[in-house]
Amino acid sequence: MTSPQRLRFAKQLLRDLDPRHSLVAGVIWLVVALAASFAIAASLWAGRVAREIVVQQHVRRLVLETDQLASDLGEAASTRLEAIRAAKDWGSPAEVFKRLLAAYPDLSWIAVADREGTVLATAKNPNSPGLNLAANVSATDWFSGALDGPWVGVLEQSPPMGDVSLLGDLAAPLKDDSGRVVAVIAAHLTWPWTSDDVQRLSKNSDPRGSTQSWVLNGAGVVVVGPPPLRNLPWSGEKLVDASPLIDPPVERPDAPHFERLADGQTVLVTRATVSIERQSARGPWQVQLSEPKEVVYRRADALAVRIVWISICLGLATAVLGAVGARRLTRRLKNLTRSAAAVGRNEVARIEVPSGRDEVAQLAAAFAKILDDLRQERSELLKLSSELERRVAVRTREVERLAEESRYAAIVRERLQIARDLHDTLAHSMMAMLSEVRLLRKLQVHDPDSLPDELVRAEQVAHAGLSEARTAITQMRANSVRDIGLGPALAKAVERFKDHTGLDVEFAADGAAARFGDERAEVIFRMTEEALRNIERHAAASKVRVTLRSSDAAQLELQIEDDGVGFDAATAKPGHFGLIGLREQAHLIGAELGITSAPNRGTMVRLTLRIAPEEL
């Protein structure tokens, strides 16, 4: 395989593994995620449960060992005490000592003292210290204690001899037939089997390494244990822990628990009380086993880790099997996708429909039917498209004809506008000039002396007409209404009219109406100028009022009033086109024009235009 082929293969593999491009990859990743999630959750749960079970088993074993050791110790002490008490029935002291030492080799010495404490007879094991004959032992604890009955005690301050720990004394009273104590028999007990138990429970004597065996007296002092700690109070501090180490909890005064030692080490402690026939006043003995916390949890943690790894491996195996199964299950869907993609690239004509009755086969059949329907519709659309093109060509020619007619109509409207402007400016000026010319001809015949003054007036009329023509041309070229709005434009026009005529003119406009400024505003402006010119030339008025306002948020209203001579608005005047022009312009912008007038009552022109609210 060449380098380009390997590169293409790697790219295709990455694309196949991308869930954004492949449903199969999405299903596989989903299976992997679910398997991993379940495996991790199950491993954590199972590991925690197994850890708790192993820890409980370990604690139970330690509790059983403690109970067994306490039971052995109590049974041994009780057995030897009973043997000493029964020794009075065995014969002479020599015979008694011989039989006791033979039966119990862990007895260091045996002695009989009279009621005053004088040793009458004694015997000992080889290599063991003993009592001297005729010695007085009345001051010893075992002698004074045995006068009241059987006695068991611990020699707390006795040092060890060799590898054997001197643990305690056993003593019992000897009575006559009347029940009076006549002597005391005692034995010193060395329990070497306690060291054997320690070796059985622990392979070394290091307190940090493994299980340690202890014997505590009622005051909590170590009487059997490692030499550095013997005859010292136990220094462990119980840790507060709400959860018991054994479920169900052990019903005993001192349940297994963790304690922190003086050196900072945390150990598991189990204790059991030694049951003996009679105990000393110091209190009961206790057998104690201790084990470092890390040792307690070592096996449990190792098992939890193994469970986690096993669960992870099983999860990976499940994920692999699920991925393979998902790939096989989605193979038909992938083939359908490839077939549809090939149809989309026009490589094949039809979608390959797989056999079977599952969803993939049904989906492929539906796609194939849709594709056939689309092809049929496509052919029909082609026919319809050609028909539409033909109709579009016909409509285009019709639109061009209508556009030509629209251009012609625009030209006609422009001509009418020019005609109205000429009527409003040049026609009025020419009429005034004609009147002056006629007057001059009459003056030339009847009053030649006034001819110069009238010529001056004729010049003024000609100059005013020229100014009006220039103003009209300027307004046709420039569009001040759109630039500044209808209100300001009307204000300037009214101000010019007032300066020109000297009449009392009032102008009022609200803010919303004053901002109006589209092409309809230009028409309203020209209509206002025409109305003001008519007032100047025909009304003989003294006061004029122009009002621009908006109402109902969608209506513009312009009102022009004068107190002039008025006229009959219902009577037509041939040859006069002022009112006709006003009505044409109002109709052009879709406005309503009302003219109210009567002779000697003035005139009111009212224009109403409906507009959209957003245009104000």
Image: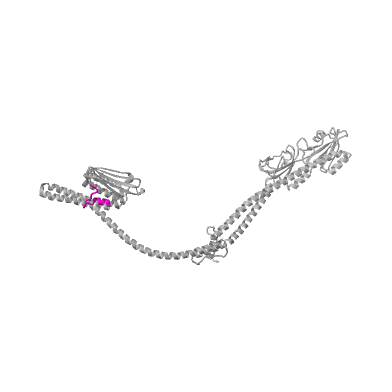
Q: Residue at 25% across / 52% down in the picture?
A: 580
Specify how the rendered protein is coloured.
Answer: one colour
Q: Bounds of the magenta span?
A: 568-583
Direction bottom: furthest residue: 348
Direction front: furthest residue: 570
Image position, residue 301 (x, y; %): 66, 49
Image position, residue 468 (x, y; %): 22, 50
Image position, residue 128 (x, y; %): 82, 41
Where is residue 83, by image quadrant? top right
Let me know if residue 581 is in the magenta part: yes
Q: Is 356 displayed left or right of 155 in the figure?
A: left
Which quadrant of the rendered structure holds the N terminus? bottom right
> Does residue 128 appear in this view?
no
Viewer-closest of 404 and 141:
404
Q: Is 191 displayed left or right of 419 in the figure?
A: right
Q: Is 111 displayed left or right of 585 in the figure?
A: right
**Secondary structure mainly formed by the magenta segment:** loop
Q: Residue at 31% across / 58% down in the picture?
A: 406
Where is residue 153, by image quadrant? top right
